[in-house]
Image (cartoon, rainbow, N blue to C red):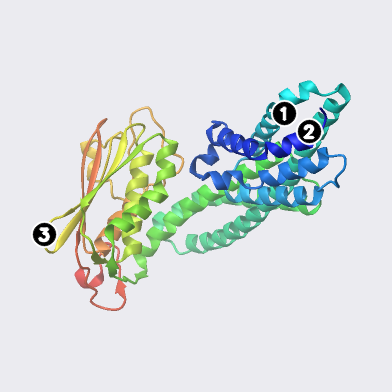
């Protein structure tokens, strides 16, 4: 029997599902952990349909569908955050599953028919990979160009900040300028090579681009923390309290931090049954507080869990608690934990690469802006518990409130 196109046609759905399951459970493709089966499946049925036409001697090859589907796949995988090695791996799995599905039938075919079928399967999968990487590289280069533009603008802002003699921020800006200039220069090199068609769609080239993007994003995170802190220290902030669903807001925070926790194999525990149904507060600022506290707990917790709990305290106040099983904070450091740039660490450890020392300082000022208070209970090697007490209704005395160096609205100082 040599009509392998008909055999493949009968097994398309089975092959596609086996491939989705294999990709979802392959530990070399971790980017699928947060994706649905539909998002993983993407264009594979189109590749199989094109392969059927290629294997059939009496049909015209549907190469155009294959090319378009693979281009879309590369763009999507770039948006989903896949590494180039993960894309290569999923196509390797596809090739293996197709051959495994046809194995028994291939053994019954003539040598010539089997060789033809295997060569065509390899050719179609290779063509799909090539088109996929083509659009993947294009998408990554576009993101790189956008990042380069953002970094250039940020670098210009840092230059202005250095001349303002704002001591702490100027110091941080000066320290960040060197790696920032390096990343900008490196990205310019990639973009120049791309315009000159010198860059090739190879895994090493893609890994270099990924490295630039990863470091660029990290540097932007550090700079944004510094700029956010500066705004609270010397700028004007408008508080916009509205009726806010506490449980819904916490669910949004968990959605953001869940991938970070899963990457460290930490459990997120919710205890919000006693949370107020609704409060009057600024949801954006409250979300910033909770996201920063949870991210900080995850960053300094190696194993165990991070717990988010809510309680109604009385008719006028409610509390939210973020507790972890992390490294804890020594008593002599607890009074300084909300100071800008102050960081504590367990003996023999190093600072997390994404730590700026500003997260808790920003939290402290935001809590004061929301007319609340924050406290810490911690034990070295056991963990830390941050308790934020907030009013059930934030009152705004004026449309715009000034935030001074203490982080309190001027009217409250």
Q: Residue at x 60, y 55 (%)?
A: 147
Residue, x 31% and y 36% (percent of image)? 305
Kindly report the distance in space between the C-alpha atoms of the residues bearing marks 3 and 1: 68 Å
Please name the residue shown 34% across and 37% down the image. 267
Residue 19 vs 357, above or below: the answer is above
On residue 383, the disc is: none
Q: Kindly identify which numbered label has been placed on residue 102.
A: 1
Assess disc 1: are there few (<14), some (14-19) or many (≥20) residues with their C-alpha within 10 Å of its C-alpha: some
- Foreground of the two, 91 or 375: 91
Q: CA distance from mark 2 to mark 3?
A: 73 Å
Judged from the image, the secondary structure of the residue bearing numbered disc 1 is helix
Residue indicated by mark 2: 4
Taking 331 as reference, is 402 left or right?
A: right
Q: Which quadrant: the C terminus? A: bottom left
Indicate left or right for 381 with 18 as reference.
left
Q: Quadrant of residue 238?
A: bottom left
Q: Nearer the viewer, mark 2 or mark 3?
A: 2
Q: Secondary structure at mark 3?
A: loop
Q: Are marks 2 and 3 in contact (CB under 8 Å)?
A: no
x, y percentage for residue 83?
A: 61, 40
Does residue 122 appear left or right of residue 210 in this picture? right
Which percent across, then down, holds residue 368?
24, 61
| Residue annotated with mark 3 | 314
- Closer to the camera: disc 3 or disc 1? 1
Number of numbered callouts drawn: 3
Q: Nearer the viewer, residue 179 or 138?
A: 138
């Amino acid at each position: 029997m040599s009509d392998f196109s008909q055999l493949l046609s009968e097994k398309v759905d089975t092959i596609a599902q086996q491939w989705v399951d294999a990709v979802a459970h392959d530990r070399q493709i971790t980017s699928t952990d947060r994706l649905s089966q539909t998002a993983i499946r993407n264009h594979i049925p189109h590749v199989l349909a094109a392969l059927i036409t290629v294997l059939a001697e009496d049909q015209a090859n549907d190469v155009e569908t294959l090319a378009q589907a693979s281009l879309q796949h590369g763009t999507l995988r770039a948006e989903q955050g896949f590494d180039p090695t993960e894309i290569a791996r999923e196509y390797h799995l596809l090739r293996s599953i197709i051959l495994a599905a046809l194995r028994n039938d291939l053994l019954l075919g003539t040598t010539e028919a089997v060789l033809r079928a295997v060569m065509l399967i390899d050719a179609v999968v290779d063509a799909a990979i090539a088109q996929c990487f083509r659009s993947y590289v294009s998408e990554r280069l576009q993101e790189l160009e956008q990042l380069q533009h953002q970094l250039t603008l940020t670098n210009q802002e840092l230059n202005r900040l250095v001349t303002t003699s704002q001591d702490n921020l100027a110091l941080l800006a000066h320290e960040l300028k060197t790696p920032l200039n390096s990343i900008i220069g490196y990205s310019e090199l990639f973009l120049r090579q791309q315009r000159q068609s010198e860059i090739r769609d190879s895994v090493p080239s893609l890994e270099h681009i990924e490295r630039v993007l990863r470091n660029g994003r990290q540097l932007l995170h550090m700079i944004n923390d510094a700029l956010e802190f500066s705004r609270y220290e010397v700028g004007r902030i408008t508080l916009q309290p509205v009726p806010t669903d506490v449980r819904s807001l916490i669910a949004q925070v968990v959605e953001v931090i869940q991938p970070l926790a899963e990457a460290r194999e930490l459990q997120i525990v919710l205890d919000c049954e006693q949370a107020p149904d609704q409060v009057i507060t600024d949801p954006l600022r409250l979300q910033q507080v909770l996201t920063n506290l949870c991210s900080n707990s995850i960053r300094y917790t190696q194993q165990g869990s991070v717990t988010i709990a809510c309680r109604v305290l009385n008719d006028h106040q409610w509390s939210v608690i973020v507790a972890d099983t992390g490294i804890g904070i020594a008593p002599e450091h607890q009074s300084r934990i909300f100071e800008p740039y102050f960081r504590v660490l367990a003996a023999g450890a190093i600072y997390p690469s994404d730590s700026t020392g500003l997260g808790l300082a920003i939290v402290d000022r935001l809590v004061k802006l929301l007319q609340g208070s924050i406290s810490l209970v911690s034990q070295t090697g056991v963990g830390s518990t941050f308790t934020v007490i907030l009013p059930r209704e934030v009152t705004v005395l004026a449309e715009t409130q000034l935030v001074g160096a203490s982080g309190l609205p001027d009217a409250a100082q």
